[in-house]
Amino acid sequence: MARTLVIGEMFEDKVRTPTLSAVTFARKVKDLTGAAFDVLVPGKGSKGAVAQIAACGADKIFYNESAPYATYTAEAYAPFVSAVAHSGGYNVVCCTADVYGKDLMPRVAATLDAGMASDIVGVEKSGDDFIFTRPIYAGNVLARMKVTTGLKVVTVRQTEFAPAEPAGGKAAIEEAPATAPEDAAARVEVLSFEKTRSERPELTEAKIVVSGGRGFKNPENFKLAEQLADLLGGAVGATRAAVDAGMVPNELQVGQTGKIVAPDIYFAIGLSGAIQHLAGMKSSKVIVAINKDEEAPIFSVADYGLVADLFQAVPQLVEELKKVKG
């Protein structure tokens, strides 16, 4: 019976939405095996916050608010998560493949001497084992793989596992015992957080994303993309080229080395559609491309394409939207 432990993420006294994508994966494993799953959420405020996910279908939800886990550091969290996973006899330990999961879970796998499947998009049963599906070569190939260790560490792609909805019932809530801090944790200290405040939705959770590329030329011009996004109630994204050129901050980068998004509508404006960018957005339900180069690769994946100068097309689109919105 493949019991699963989901590692949740806290921020500002709330369980972050990406945690629920890992819960969806755990539900899938439960459907395949019939085994229960639990959730572990360390961090300041976790005792009260876990009530938010008590109806997610888990058997138990563990929390710990001890000082070493008040603020996330991989050096403190990895030994703690590993100890809970080992003592609970779990077969699968999973987390969403966001910044948190990508930082934490390789350390957990190393501590547990476990094999790891990262950024997976699917799971199926094969005899007494699992086959995990994950994209490789910037998403152009899907690899099917087995993890041959008894305990498996997994990170799941958020865009492929929708956030879990309440499943009825109520999980038991317990405090997980803290572990003795290791030397590495004592040498790391979080000095402060610099939070970017925006009225726009979170990029990875937005239903509409307006992304721009090198074609915007400078930060001032990029305000056109921001204006369009605000009218649509969407988030703003960018290519690596736009980020490297200083048009927008790094947290807006979409692509293989940025964030993976799959909104209902993705506007790709003034970007060519390099393979590295496509890896981060081609799962979007509808892709709308605007580019003056009719040979741009982005048109090969677009549902709707407009060959036009963005400095003419986007202002016209903005004006029409203003008319519609009154």
Image (spheres, rainbow, N blue to C red):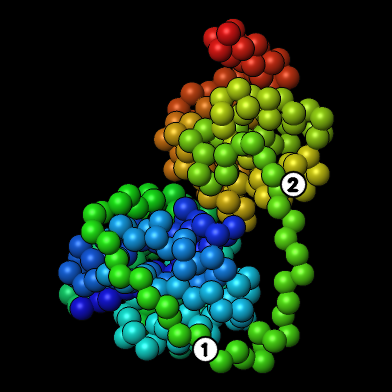
Q: Which residue in the structure is indicated by mark 1?
A: 179
Q: Classify 10 Å Cα crowding around label 2: few (below 14), some (14-19), many (20 and above).
A: some
Q: Nearer the viewer, residue 300 or 183?
A: 183
Q: Which residue in the structure is indicated by mark 2?
A: 249
Q: Is residue 158 left or right of residue 90?
A: right
Q: Position of residue 244 (x, y in %)?
A: 77, 48
Whether 59 is drawn above or below 219: the answer is below
Q: Position of residue 140 (x, y in %)?
A: 46, 52
The numbered mark, 1 or 2, whose residue comes first in the sequence reads 1
Which residue is found at the position 73% from the left and 19% from the top? 311
Which residue is found at the position 61% from the left and 79% from the top? 67
> Under tag 1, what secondary structure?
loop
Q: Is residue 118 visible?
A: no
Q: Amino acid at mark 1?
A: Thr
Image quarter (top left, top right, bottom left or bottom right) of the C terminus: top right
Quarter-of-image position of residue 246: top right
**In the image, which is nearer the foreground, mark 1 or mark 2?**
1
Q: Amino acid at mark 2?
A: Pro
Quarter-of-image position of residue 37: bottom left
